[in-house]
């Protein structure tokens, strides 16, 4: 061969020389594209895809079990099936059993069904030989094509590569297609638990000690890489903590032209002849060369073989160097992570070209050292072609699937369907009727002696007390004309220490009088005897407007010597004990009644009062004729239902009581009492959630099974916590809230905690809605109406502050009382105003104007 020929060969081969500068440009180009793709910046069209794989941690080495692995596309038109046994940290290592199948071209170019039936057929063939019997089998699917994953076992094929072109698969979930093919075989009980890209399989197959691989590199028929990225950098995930493996899909780099400087006419021709022109740009002994050229029907001279070798060398060198440039871009991402291991980075390598080519890996590593001299990189050959890695991911996926099942089993009893709610509505209705008749009923239907709503003519100054909710308040209420002054309120919140709420009755009422006196002083009311209305939010058998016998404490109150006593007398006695104080107690009012009156002042259709706060209860205007305890059958009277005790007689709600509810009830100061309230109100929801979280921690579903002392602490989870967790927060914000409770959670935990809160509060809202539906339906039927329009005055921190509670109550009422048009009116200024209006109405009816 003469000089000219050698010269022209050299000129030709020079085109495959990629300079260091070009490699750095390519490295920078890929890095730029990676960051744009991660940011999902609008208008940018990066040519690498950066696909989240939902693999969130490198192997822990603890994974155990037998797993079936199906590899499709990792090495061209072959398919491999493996049986991998993971033995955890301590167990002896077991070599996988595997079998390779060649996929006929008519299958790789046929229909998707043909391909997946072929794959399922190979699985059956393999398992028949293995004789695994009928046990359920968990399969990890190593599918090495560009896919958009939405979960560990959900993956949509974006586009075929590597010579595949089966119809009806692009845009489809390949896991579903495989499941259907396995079902068509109907031979084995195989569950497809995870789908994994071959680079991920390579990365996950590495032994985690002394250091887990954080990058997976495959150079085979195709080439690609994956690596562990910070989730906060992956825009589509909207998370802040933890890492996730990202499948770079760098094969498409340069589709936008970035590789033109290094592309030769040979590459362009190859591209044009490829199945997918314009995408996926660019990819050995003398005797071997001779043999191969002869196989191609050529008769090469020794020099020809030498030149062919040079061409091969030039092409593969460029491939190794280009691959190195891309890999150093990935390494730059890994090394930008402040939390990365100080031990440098380990890269798992796989693929026949990388493994079998005599110089590829060495040249690649050399170029990596050139382009990233300060990167401390260890290359670790992946085992079993990544089969073990796929099994590890499958083990992780099955653990997550088991956790999901355990979570669903735990939360299932909280998911109520409409039949159950209709039953609650009907049982409540029956109990209401029995209560009104004075028959035994868990709902006591207490007459309140409030028979009229405010009509706007009320006037006067009133003192009001508001006891029983989150805060104890003293109020000065000035009732003026509705059109002019309206109602003005001056109030002050006073603390109520547990020593008072759980001390003696005398201590409690003396404390109340002390607060009144302080308030009077502050507002220059000392010595004035304003009519005083007492909102006392506990079950009282009223004998008149200003007489109420406390039946039993609720909501954590248990002051002694009060139950069975007339509360107004207890207050008056305390006033007498306090020398020089004159107070004219004219009315005792339940907070539901106060709320109804206060909203009734705004909306005359308001005939129901609802409280969903620390406790829960409702009242409504009942036909006097239906109230057996009060003589007379004309007009209406407001009935304080005390529905919190619904089910205390064991005739209702049994089926809804989960072990968590029972624990909360048992640990309360009134076990067996207020059973409806304990499923609904703010004082208990946090505790129910805590019990469920404890249970899920025991099951290792949550917090990796770590039992945090804070979670053992009673009442540590306040209802405010549910409202915050369920509001529209990002996962990291939820995590931050958990951290405030000394619960170290990852983003998966945060999501699970939110699901628990949602299930508990939704059940509460639905049960509350069933109660409201029973009340409005009673009013409608009382009045023989086809349709009823009514307003419900409502108050209470849970209803007011929880992001979804009120809407869920309304949804339930709409479904359960379709003939009622129910408006929910939030009470402003609480029920103190309503209590003052009760006095004002009483004064008006009594014909006595306020002072
Ligand atoms: C308002 C009313 C109180 C009522 C309370 C219930 O504050 O003025 O009379 O008891 O709501 O809600 P809570 O969430 O405070 O228990
Ligand atoms: C009490 C009711 C009160 C409700 C809301 C319940 O525990 O028994 O009287 O209306 O809480 O505060």
Image (spheres, helix red, strand yellow):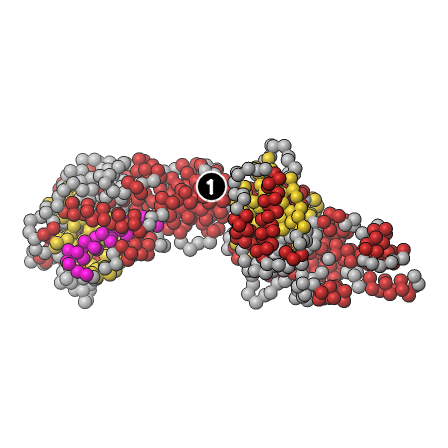
Residue that numbered label 1 is attached to:
701
Snapshot quadrant of residue 65: top right
Q: x%, y% of residue 104?
A: 66, 54
For residue 422, side relative to residue 726 (left or right)? left
Q: x%, y% of residue 800?
A: 31, 54
The foreground one among 2 and 472 is: 2
Tell me which residue sits at (78%, 50%) in the image.
Answer: 359
Magenta stretch encompasses residue 384 = no
Q: Is residue 22 above or below residue 592?
A: below
The image quadrant where one finds the N terminus is bottom right
> What range of the chain is rendered magenta?
762-786
For the image, the number of numbered tags is 1
The foreground one among 217 and 500 is: 217
Q: x%, y% of residue 810?
A: 29, 56
Disc 1, SS: loop
Q: Please identify the dominant SS of the magenta region.
A: helix
Tell me which residue sits at (70%, 54%) in the image.
Answer: 221
Tell me which residue sits at (87%, 58%) in the image.
Answer: 299
Label 1, residues with CA under 10 Å away: few <14, some 14-19, many ≥20: many
Q: Is residue 221 visible?
A: yes
Tell me which residue sits at (58%, 57%) in the image.
Answer: 112
Snapshot quadrant of residue 599: bottom left
The image quadrant where one finds the C terminus is bottom left
The foreground one among 518 and 462 is: 462
């Amino acid at each position: 061969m003469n000089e000219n020929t050698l010269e022209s060969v050299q000129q030709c081969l020079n085109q495959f020389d990629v300079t260091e500068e070009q490699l750095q440009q390519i490295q920078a180009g890929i890095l730029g594209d990676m960051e744009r793709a991660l940011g999902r910046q609008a208008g940018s069209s990066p040519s690498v895809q950066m696909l989240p794989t939902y693999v969130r941690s490198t192997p822990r080495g603890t994974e155990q079990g037998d797993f079936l692995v199906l590899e499709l596309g990792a090495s061209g038109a072959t398919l491999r099936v493996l049986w991998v046994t993971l033995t955890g940290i301590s167990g002896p290592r077991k070599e996988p059993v595997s079998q390779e199948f060649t996929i006929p071209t008519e299958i790789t170019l046929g229909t998707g069904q043909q391909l997946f039936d072929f794959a399922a057929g190979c699985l059956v063939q393999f398992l028949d030989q293995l004789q695994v019997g009928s046990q359920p089998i968990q399969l990890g699917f190593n599918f090495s094509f560009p896919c958009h994953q939405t979960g560990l076992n959900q993956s949509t094929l974006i586009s075929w590569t590597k010579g595949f072109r089966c119809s009806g698969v692009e845009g489809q979930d390949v896991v579903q297609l495989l499941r259907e093919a396995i079902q068509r075989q109907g031979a084995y009980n195989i569950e497809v638990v995870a789908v994994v890209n071959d680079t991920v399989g390579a990365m996950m197959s590495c032994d985690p000690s002394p250091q887990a691989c954080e990058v997976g590199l495959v150079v085979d028929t195709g080439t690609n890489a994956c690596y562990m990225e910070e989730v906060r950098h992956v825009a589509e995930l909207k998370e802040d903590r933890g890492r996730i493996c990202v499948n770079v899909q760098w094969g498409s780099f340069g589709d936008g032209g970035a590789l033109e400087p290094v592309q030769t006419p040979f590459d362009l021709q190859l591209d044009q002849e490829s199945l997918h022109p314009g995408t996926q740009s660019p990819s050995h002994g003398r005797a071997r060369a001779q043999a191969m050229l002869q196989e191609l029907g050529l008769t090469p001279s020794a020099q020809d073989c030498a030149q062919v070798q040079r061409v091969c060398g030039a092409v593969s060198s460029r491939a190794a160097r280009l691959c190195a440039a891309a890999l150093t871009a990935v390494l730059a991402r890994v090394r930008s992570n402040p939390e990365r291991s100080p031990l440098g980075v380990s890269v798992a390598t796989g693929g026949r070209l990388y493994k079998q080519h005599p110089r590829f890996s060495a040249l690649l590593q050399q170029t990596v050292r050139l382009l990233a001299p300060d990167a401390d990189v260890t290359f670790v050959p992946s085992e079993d072609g990544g089969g073990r890695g796929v099994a590890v991911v499958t083990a992780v996926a099955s653990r997550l699937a088991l956790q999901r099942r355990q979570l669903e089993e735990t939360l299932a009893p909280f998911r109520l369907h409409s039949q159950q709610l209709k039953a609650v509505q009907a049982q409540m209705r029956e109990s209401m009727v029995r209560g009104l008749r004075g028959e035994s009923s868990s709902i006591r239907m207490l007459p309140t002696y409030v028979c009229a709503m405010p009509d706007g003519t009320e006037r006067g100054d009133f003192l009001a007390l508001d006891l029983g909710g989150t805060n104890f308040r003293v109020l000065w209420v000035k009732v003026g004309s509705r059109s002019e002054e309206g109602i003005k309120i001056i109030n002050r919140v006073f603390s109520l220490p547990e020593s008072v709420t759980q001390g003696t009755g005398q201590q409690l009422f003396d404390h109340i009088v002390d607060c009144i006196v302080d308030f009077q002083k502050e507002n220059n009311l000392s010595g004035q005897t304003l009519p005083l209305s007492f909102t006392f939010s506990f079950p009282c058998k009223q004998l008149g407007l200003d007489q109420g016998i406390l039946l039993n404490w609720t909501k954590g109150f248990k002051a002694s010597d009060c139950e069975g006593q007339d509360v107004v007398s207890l207050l008056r006695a305390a006033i007498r004990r306090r020398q020089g104080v004159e107070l004219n107690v004219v009315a005792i009012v339940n907070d539901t009644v106060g709320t109804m009156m206060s909203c009734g002042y705004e909306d005359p259709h308001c005939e129901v009062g609802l409280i969903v706060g620390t406790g829960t209860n409702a009242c409504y205007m009942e036909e006097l004729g239906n109230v057996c305890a009060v003589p007379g059958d004309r007009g209406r009277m407001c009935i304080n239902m005390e529905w919190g005790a619904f089910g205390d007689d064991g005739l209702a709600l049994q089926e809804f009581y989960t072990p968590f509810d029972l624990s909360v009830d048992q640990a309360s100061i009134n076990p067996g009492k207020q059973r409806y309230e304990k499923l609904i109100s703010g004082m208990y929801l946090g505790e129910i959630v805590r019990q469920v979280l404890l249970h899920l921690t025991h099951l290792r579903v949550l917090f990796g099974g770590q039992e945090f002392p804070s979670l053992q602490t009673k009442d540590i989870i306040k209802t405010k916590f549910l409202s915050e967790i369920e509001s529209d927060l990002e996962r990291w914000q939820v995590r931050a809230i958990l951290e405030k409770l000394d619960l170290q959670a990852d983003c998966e935990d945060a999501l699970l905690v939110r699901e628990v809160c949602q299930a508990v509060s939704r059940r509460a809202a639905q049960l509350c809605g069933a109660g409201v539906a029973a009340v409005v339906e009673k009013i409608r039927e009382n009045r023989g109406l086809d349709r009823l329009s009514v307003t419900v005055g409502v108050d209470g921190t849970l209803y007011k502050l929880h992001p979804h509670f009120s809407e869920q109550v309304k949804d339930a009422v709409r479904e359960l009382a379709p003939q009622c048009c129910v408006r929910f009116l939030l009470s402003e200024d609480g029920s103190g105003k309503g209590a003052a209006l009760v006095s004002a109405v009483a004064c008006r009816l009594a014909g006595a104007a306020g002072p």
